[in-house]
Amino acid sequence: MRHVLVIGAGGGLGKALVAHYLNEGALVTAWSRREQPFMHENLQWRTLSDYSPEQLHAEIEQLQALDGVISTLGMLHNNDFMPEKHLGAVSAAQLRHSFEINAILPILLLEQLLPKLPRKQPAFWVQLSAKVGSITDNYLGGWYSYRASKAALNMLLKTASIELRRSHKQLIIAAVHPGTTDTELSAPFQERLPADKLYTPEQSAARIAQVIENLTTEHSGKLLHWDGTELPY
Ligand SMILES: NC(=O)c1ccc[n+]([C@@H]2O[C@H](COP(=O)([O-])OP(=O)(O)OC[C@H]3O[C@@H](n4cnc5c(N)ncnc54)[C@H](OP(=O)(O)O)[C@@H]3O)[C@@H](O)[C@H]2O)c1
């Protein structure tokens, strides 16, 4: 049975991805700071206080070997911060927090979980990223912290993919843009969106899973759109 770890499993896309992989017959380990939302015989839900290396050490020790990991960790806004509309709104605190959640946590997770990923068999490491983290594709400006932290994430993943190509020949490391999906993260920004440009978490989870099914080692280090095409960095 395929074993998939979903990190950030309590969020909109995380929950939908857990359900998707359970429906596909996989064994799913789910990490979240939230309580288990539903029961399933193939679901191992672990509620964590945070994603710090100290907290994860014991979790990782007892984890069975993995075939793939999907991390949905990401932050666009919270009670303290909204995406910056102009330079005057940029603050060190928001930049730091965004980098912490969007770039630093994901790469530390990859570092810590690597021993649980096979060296010689096919496996995937997918982190949800965002098209707005593409430097080439930035025509609108704004959203300084989110854009910059996702761009940093993409660079960190690309760098890891180059190194790990040698030790983990069939491990594919990819950043995937899920498309604008109806979750807490996008909720404040949905008003002006045409209805056909806002996807349900279930739709997006199925598309992300499809991208994963089609991954080859050629995709490692890339930023991929939910339709499977490559996005520029
Ligand atoms: N929704 C969209 O339109 C959209 C578009 C482009 C990219 N994305 C990306 O897709 C991913 C999933 O987003 P979503 O829409 O499902 O958002 P969400 O519902 O807010 O989920 C984000 C997840 O990140 C974790 N997280 C958030 N803040 C955190 C913090 N301060 N400390 C630790 N963990 C934190 C949470 O994990 P737990 O609460 O489970 O612990 C949460 O499940 C994100 O990386 C986002 O950038 C989303």
Image (spheres, rainbow, N blue to C red):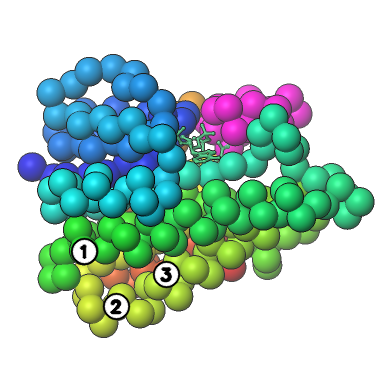
- Secondary structure at badge 2 equals helix
Residue farthest along the bottom direction in this orientation: 166
Left or right for 128, reference 76: left
Task: For label 3, count other residues whose C-alpha is less than 10 Å away and answer few (under 14), some (14-19) or many (20+).
Answer: many
- Give above or below for 157 relative to 50: below
The answer to whether the residue labelled 3 contacts the one labelled 2, judged by CB atoms less than 8 Å apart, is: no
Quarter of the rendering containing residue 147: bottom right
Marks 2 and 1, how far apart in space? 15 Å
Nearer to us: label 3 or label 1: 1
Q: Could you tell me if residue 222 is visible in this image?
A: no
The answer to whether the residue labelled 2 contacts the one labelled 1, judged by CB atoms less than 8 Å apart, is: no
- Secondary structure at badge 1 equals helix
Of the numbered discs 3 and 2, the one sitting upstream in the chain is 2
Residue holding disc 2: 165
Residue holding disc 3: 221
Residue holding disc 1: 115
The boundaries of the magenta stretch are: 180-199
| Percent x, y of residue 228 | 42, 54
Q: Amino acid at mark 3?
A: Gly
Q: Is residue 92 magenta?
A: no
Identify the residue at horizontal 36%, vertical 22% (top origin).
35
Of the numbered discs 2 and 1, the one sitting upstream in the chain is 1
| Percent x, y of residue 202 | 40, 28
Q: Could you tell me if residue 28 is visible in this image?
A: yes
- Secondary structure at badge 3 equals loop
Marks 3 and 1, how far apart in space? 19 Å
Identify the residue at horizontal 61%, vertical 56% (top origin).
99
- Quadrant position of the N terminus in the picture: top left
Marks 3 and 2, how far apart in space? 10 Å
Q: Amino acid at mark 2?
A: Arg
